[in-house]
Amino acid sequence: MVSVLSPAEVKRPDGSSIEFANLDIAATAPCLDVVAEAVADLLPWYGSVHRGAGALARRSTLAYEQARETVFDHLGCGPHDTVVFTRNTTDALNLLAHAVPAGTTVVTFDAEHHANLLPWREPVRLGVPRSAAEAVATLAETLPTLTGPVLVAVTAASNVTGELWPIAELAEVAHRHGARIAVDAAQLAPHAAVDMTALDVDYLALSGHKLYAPFGAGVLAGRADWLDAAPPYLAGGGATAAVSADFTVRWHDGPARHEAGTPNLIGVVALATAFRALADVDMSEEHRLVARLRAGISALPHVEELRLFGPEAPRVGIVSFAVLGRDPDELNTVLGRDHAIGVRTGLFCAHPLTRRLLAEATARLDPAAEPPGAAIRASAGIGTTEEHIDRLLAVLAAHG
Ligand code: PMP
């Protein structure tokens, strides 16, 4: 069974010690024990990638390319796909935005994380759907009105509500109308296996640090043609096949084209190790804990969860909520300082969406109340226990 590295206990202001309740795993996940071991095993062999013939360089290059194969296999990539290593999801989506052919219309929903909202040039925005079916229907209505190449860019799981988006259905609609689809899997990949061939998606972005591999690597996986046709994302060594005496450059095709500079060997080995380990993790305990948290929240008269699609929509281990009558930042401080609970407050890099969902959640509790300026988000994952959830619920109950 895999587990995560965590401090045994942390101190509270009264001098007592308590296990830290990390309920901020959606922001960045702790390191898996097997990931830390793989990194420690590699470090004595750490050397240059693609640039040398010594023992360290050979071993490091092999480890780097094996990591690429592991990611390719675990994401269910197909024969036309490639895996490019990036820094994180933001970097991966910016790379894709850079590679999209000129004249392509990008279609996205207003419910996206900023990483999938801001890199696109003048996208067609489809608003915030109120159900998975409405998302599919809106896309199906919009695509026939567009001409030229189209890329649909959508999240697989909301970082605000944790709700799952109907990726396979959206992909089917996109392809029926000759469009491609890119999926932000930053929040889905840590909680479920993602098979790009089964979902029939063209591009997928994710972050290693959300996948229990916090060593600075991310992934853009997907169809190689646009990536091979695009100018290199970064100009420099590693992306160049040859530079002539008059400085004319021939760039590599394939992933190297967009991976200029010394690559993050440790990060990608960590990421590949996490993929292998997570394939064996039973997520049912996480689902049980999230259900417990949601049931506890719904029993509190001053706390209301944020949601896009409705209470029954399937979701990953994320629950955001509005707390009425309390300053969210003060409550966050109390949770962290006095109760050793880590959560997140704010608008979660999805400002328009979170403001809107906060207003709706507040109105469900009390139509006359002013919505709080920020939501609180609790997120569960490997290492979360029932006691962590109950501790959070008890503090929320005491601050009503
Ligand atoms: N998309 C989603 C859904 C996210 O939750 C996040 C991280 N909060 C990102 C994209 C961006 O990820 P990163 O900060 O690792 O680039």
Image (cartoon, rainbow, N blue to C red):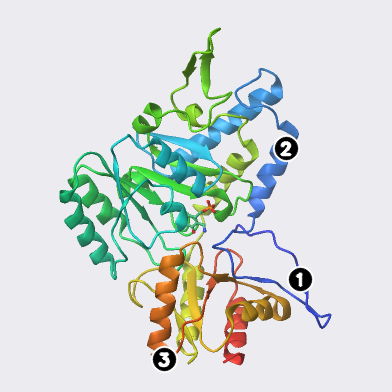
Circle 1 residues within 10 Å: few <14, some 14–19, many ≥20: few
Say what amino acid the circle numbered 1 marks. Answer: Glu
Residue wearing tag 3 = 366
State the separation of the CA atoms marked 1 and 3. Answer: 39 Å
Disc number placed over residue 43 in the picture, else none: 2
Position of the N terminus, as image quadrant, is: bottom right
Whole-percent x, y for residue 184 in the image = 42, 52
Q: Earlier in the sequence, mark 1 or mark 2?
A: 1
Helix, strand or loop at label 2? It is helix
From the top left corner, tell me how far across and down residue 361 is, in percent: 41, 81
Contact check, label 1 and label 2, Cβ < 8 Å: no
Q: Position of residue 333 (x, y in %)?
A: 67, 77
Tell me which amino acid carries mark 3.
Answer: Asp
Q: Is residue 398 visible?
A: yes
Q: Quadrant of residue 33?
A: bottom right
Query: Mark 1 falls on what kind of element?
Result: loop
Q: Is residue 318 above or below residue 265?
A: below
| Residue that label 1 marks | 9
Q: In this rendered view, identify the residue nearer to me: 234 or 201.
A: 234
For the residues carrying marks 1 and 3, which lies nearer the camera in this image?
A: 3
Q: Residue at x 50, y 39 (%)?
A: 70
Dot 1 beta carbon under 8 Å from ligand 1: no
At x 40%, y 29%, the residue is 230
- In the rendered view, does 10 fall on the left or right side of 297? right
The residue at the point 51 percent across, 87 percent down is 324
Q: Quadrant of the C terminus?
A: bottom right
Residue 306 in sight from this viewpoint: no
Q: Nearer the viewer, residue 72 or 377?
A: 377
Residue 126 versus residue 252: which sits nearer the camera? 126
Mark sitting earlier along the chain (2/3) = 2
Q: Callout 3: 10 Å neighbours few (<14), some, many (20+)?
A: some
Separation of residues labelled 2 and 3 (CA atoms): 56 Å
